[in-house]
Image: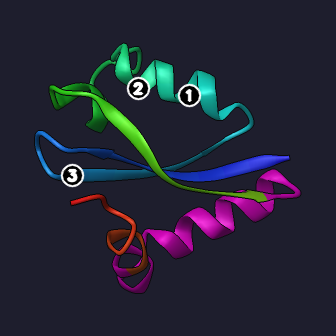
Amino acid sequence: MFIVYAIYNKRHRKFYIGQTEDIETRELLHNEKTFKNSYTARLEGDWVIIYQEQVQSRQQALKREKQLKSYRGRQFIKQNIPL
């Protein structure tokens, strides 16, 4: 099982869409700034999961991630951002 997710940084009002097999570890890695020079590491503040969905394979996860990164997908994600 793979998880497609969106995380949100309230301090900068930005979100990031990705996919993983282990959502808890991935959230921790984003918050610890493990991914040097990445989008999430450049922004200070905590990242919180605002959306996630499970898919059966990595291929499906990559396809869904691409859909969520489209204009319509980003509009869908923005509906899940806590105010």
| Mark carried by residue 14 | 3
Residue 31 falls left or right of residue 52: left
The residue labelled by disc 1 is 26
Corner quadrant of residue 37: top left
Q: Position of residue 67 (x, y in %)?
A: 54, 75
Q: Amino acid at mark 2?
A: His
Classify 10 Å Cα crowding around label 1: few (below 14), some (14-19), many (20 and above).
Answer: some
- Residue 12 % position (x, y): 11, 44
Q: Residues within 10 Å of mark 2 (few under 14, many from 20)?
A: some
Left or right of residue 40: residue 17: right
What's the distance in space between the residues labelled 1 and 3, CA to CA? 17 Å
Question: Mark 3 is on which residue type?
Answer: Lys
Q: Which residue is mark 2?
A: 30
Residue at image point 34% right, 80% down: 75
Q: Is residue 53 magenta?
A: no
Q: Are the residues at dot 2 and dot 1 in contact (C-beta closer than 8 Å)? A: yes
Label 3 vs 2, first from the N-terminus: 3
Which of 11 and 62 lies nearest the eye of the viewer?
11
Q: Amino acid at mark 1?
A: Arg
Which quadrant would residue 42 be assigned to in this image? top left
